[in-house]
Image: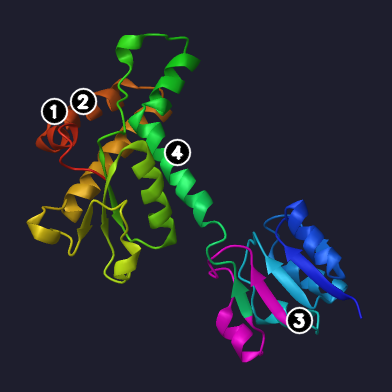
Amino acid sequence: MEKTVVILGGELAPEGRSLLEEAGASVIATPPYIDRQAVIETMKAHRPDAVIVRLLADLLGSEEMQAGGRLRHIAKHGVGTNDIDVKSATALGIPVSMTTGSNGHSVAEHALALIMALVKDLPRQDALIRDGIWDKNQYKGRELRGQRLGLVGFGFIGQTLAKMAGAIGMTVSAFDPHAPDSAFGDEVTDRIVDHRRGDAGVEAEAVGEVRRAVKLAAADVDVAVRGFAERDRTRVEAVDESAEGQEVQRGRARC
C-alpha cells in the first residue's frame, strides 16, 4: 500500500524528494509558513502516514496531528522541535525524529563566513561601494591568521569550525564542560576548563569580555547597515577610544 508523506512548510531538495518517491511514497508539499487552519485542512485532505516539518507559522499540535487519522511519524527537517508539540505526539504514540548533525557543516561554514565578513570589513566596504566611494584609506580589514577564536560549546559544529579556523592559521580556545576529552584534538590550542582560566594557568577571556567584544562587532555592522550616519560613527569611535575598544584592538578580548 502506498504511503503518503506531507512536507509542511516548503519543498524538499530534489534529492530528498526523490528518495521518498523511490521508496514508494506519494509526496505532497505545502507552501512555507502555513497557519494552523491550513495544516488541519492539508492533513484532512491527504491523510498522511508521515509529515516532514519545515517552516510553520504555528505549533504543530494535537488537533493537527489527529486531523488526518493516519499519522504515524513526524520528522523535523532540522534539529529543533520548538514548532512541534512533542508532548502531544508522545501522548498519541507518534514518534518525533530530527536530522541531528545534518546541517552542522553548513552552520560552521556560515559562522566562518560571518567572522570573515567582520574581520575583512565587508559590510562597511559594501556600503561604501554602493555609495560610489572607492577609498583604500577607509579599509579597516585585517588577517585572521594568528588571531584567536574562542568557542563556547564544542559539539560537532564547534569542532568543525575549529578545523576550518586552524586551516586558516588561527589559534583556537574551546570551552565545553560536557564534551569528552577526545573532542579536543590538535586544532584546539587551549582547552578552557572554566570561563576564566585554562589548562596550565593559561588565561582565558572572561565571559564579560567576550560579550563586550560581540557588542563592539555588532556596532560595526550597525554602522554599515545604517549607511554610516554621523550619530553611529560618533558612537562607534567613542567606543573604540574606550578601554574596551583598546582591549579588542590589542587582541585581548575576542569572540
Query: Residue sitting at 42 percent across and 28 percent down?
Result: 123
| Vertical side of 33 occupied by 120: above or below | above
Residue picked out by circle 3:
71
Q: Secondary structure at mark 1?
A: helix
Q: Answer with mark 1 or mark 3, whichever residue precedes in sequence.
A: 3
Tag 2 secondary structure: helix
Q: Secondary structure at mark 4?
A: helix
Amino acid type, residue under disc 3 in the picture: Leu
Q: Which is nearer the eye, 57 or 71?
A: 71
Question: For the point 55% across and 56% down, which residue is it?
Answer: 103
Residue at point 39%, 49% (across, down): 163
Q: Which residues are magenta?
A: 71-95
Residue topped by disc 1: 241
In the image, which is nearer the foreground, mark 1 or mark 4?
A: 4
Q: Where, quadrant-wise, is the N terminus in this rendering?
A: bottom right
In contact (CB < 8 Å): disc 1 and disc 2: yes
Percent from the top left, x then y, of residue 169? 31, 37
